Amino acid sequence: MEEKKLDINSIIGFVLIFGILIFMFYQNQPTPEELEAQKAEQEQVEAEAKKVEEEAQKPTIKETQTINLNDSTAVAEYKSGVGAFGFSAVSDGTTKLENEVLYLEVSNKGGQIVEARMKNFVTYDSVPVYLVKDGNANFALNFTTSDNRVLNTADLYFEPSFSKSGDNHVLSMKAKVADNQFLEYRYEMKPNEYLVNFTVRSQGLNGVLNSSKPVTLEWELKGIRHSKSVRYENRYTRLTYNHEDGKISKLSENSDLDEETVEDVKWLSYRQHFFSSILATDDHLESAQLSSKNLVEEESKELHFTKEYNTKASLKLQGGELSQSMYWYYGPTDVKVLDDYKDLGLVDTIPFGWGIFGWINRYVFTPLYGFLSSFLPFGIAIIVMTILVRLAMSPVTYKSYLSQAKMKVLKPEIAEINEKYKDNAMKKQQETMKVYNKAGVSPMSGCVPALLQLPIFYALFMFFPTSFALRQKSFLWAQDLSSYDAIIEWTTNIPFISKFYGNHVSLFPILASIAIFFYMQMTTGQSMQMQQQPGMPNMKFIMYLSPIMMLFFFNNYASGLSLYYFISNLITIFIMLVIKNYILDEEKIHARIQENKKKPKKENKFQRKMREMMEQAEQQKNSGRR
């Protein structure tokens, strides 16, 4: 009775405490004025966070010294600060350098390119494609003079002079010490080319430059966004470089900051997915410090930049003078264009993939698609290429299905073994392998054809997202075969969904997922009906996982890739139905297996070793029971 009373008292106590807490919460709830203050404080915090994000997206390339050219005192101070280089005329302005495909502006301040625009390309929102604009890039030389002044050419004023050499336009920018003593940047642009000859040289400066101190080349650039999905574009935005006698290497595409010091550099490519800013040289750079900083954390329509690149390289003085022959390339990352510069090897800046995968992509799929798209609509060319690939792989598909048919014929015998030795996994495995060996069937033979298709799969996986030929080419509802084919879009960020799936629904990945589901049913359905062997993968799980992975992973990928997998799986299903209904005869397969069982089988070394190991394990297990 006392115990019951105690329980009642406890309950009353809890109710009272709860009531007191509710009363305290009510008494201490914020007033409307306090709620307004909290709201204003929250808005201020959000505004400050947005301001920080906007500041991070502004060009933060090293700022140069600015002077008021109308202020004679400021000009005099500038001339005094740069010493002998104060001889150059001080004037603002830029000089235009253009041909049919490329527009450049070169500034008197620093003598460097301050605008680089493609004439024949626009971004996803119809804005001209800029690689250099509004201070997102800086090119300069750091050097020490004989009177120990440390100067940066980005702070010096250069005098421009324009001329022609045949059909070529030549722009000479000179930072002068005297009329016949100067540091010169010489730009030479050819008709219809994205490659610009660029020479850095000095004349009469062997007594002006301090030869005991290094001359450092600095090149910085923030990659300007060009695509509607900044995360997808950023995945293929990367610093690539040629060094050590032709070795091609890359900095990380997703690391917050990746740095590397390399030697014997032939060219540096600041790739921005489908467009590249490349600095190449005939005389290799002896050493260079490279860095790549990732600026994209999540999908956003407000982000303007993808990565920030930085290079610092040493230049040699020869006889106290500077002479370096180089090239600027501002243009598309297109195999048709870059392949024209074989001497420089610029085509290697394209991410074809590594090893045999890259070879297949570069020498098979790229020219094949180029040929088909020369006379077919771009989407139809993908379908035709898919048909050709699947027909070429049909013998592999036949081998795979033949292996499945053999396994199906053996299913009753395997089921008997599973039932007979259901309590002895080792014996069950042993007897199963004996049946397979006598019948001349290998459980792994179905996996080999799949492995043979991996190089094709990976090569195509790299081809579609990086093929310039697909950029902004439409097909059916897909506006751009090199980007996702959204049929539904929303702006609200949904936790998990927005991060892993995106703020849109692409249709081709859905169709590809449905097709791969039916394909997996055909190829794994028989395996699922058989009792799961120990250590073997759960085929039912794989059958459902593959389409889901396709649905999520490819939602943000190139629609051309999803179109390929959709058509490819449809064709594969068709080929397998033809093989099943018109080519393979299960009764003949069964008869052939029975004949194989009658033939004496000679074990190879591996089979004998495996059998002996399993027998030893079985003996140890039995002895342990005794």
Image (cartoon, grey):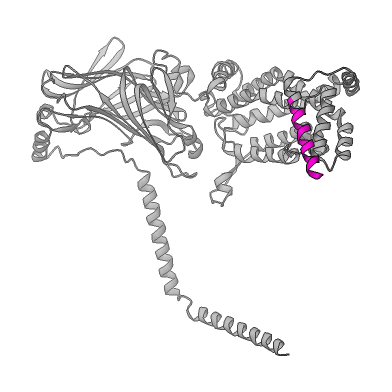
* Rendered residue at 37%/51% (across/down): 52
Q: Residue furthest top?
A: 166
Q: Nearer the viewer, residue 581 or 489?
A: 581
Q: Nearer the viewer, residue 330 or 575?
A: 575
Q: Is residue 160 left or right of residue 375?
A: left
Quadrant position of residue 443: top right
Quadrant position of residue 107: top left
- Range drawn in magenta: 609-626
Q: Is 145 inside the magenta-drawn segment?
A: no
Q: In this rendering, does residue 503 appear at all?
A: no
* Rendered residue at 49%/45% (across/down): 298
Residue 544 pos. (x, y %): 72, 41
Q: Is 170 above or below relative to 415?
A: above
Total residue callouts: 0
Location of the C terminus by quadrant is: top right
Location of the N terminus by quadrant is: bottom right
* Rendered residue at 64%/23% (across/down): 380
Q: Nearer the viewer, residue 185 or 145?
A: 145
Residue 529 pos. (x, y %): 83, 37
Q: Is residue 377 left or right of residue 618?
A: left
Residue 68 pos. (x, y %): 15, 40
Quadrant position of residue 138: top left
Q: Is 620 inside the magenta-drawn segment?
A: yes
Q: Nearer the viewer, residue 135 or 444?
A: 444
Q: In this rendering, does residue 612 appear at all?
A: yes
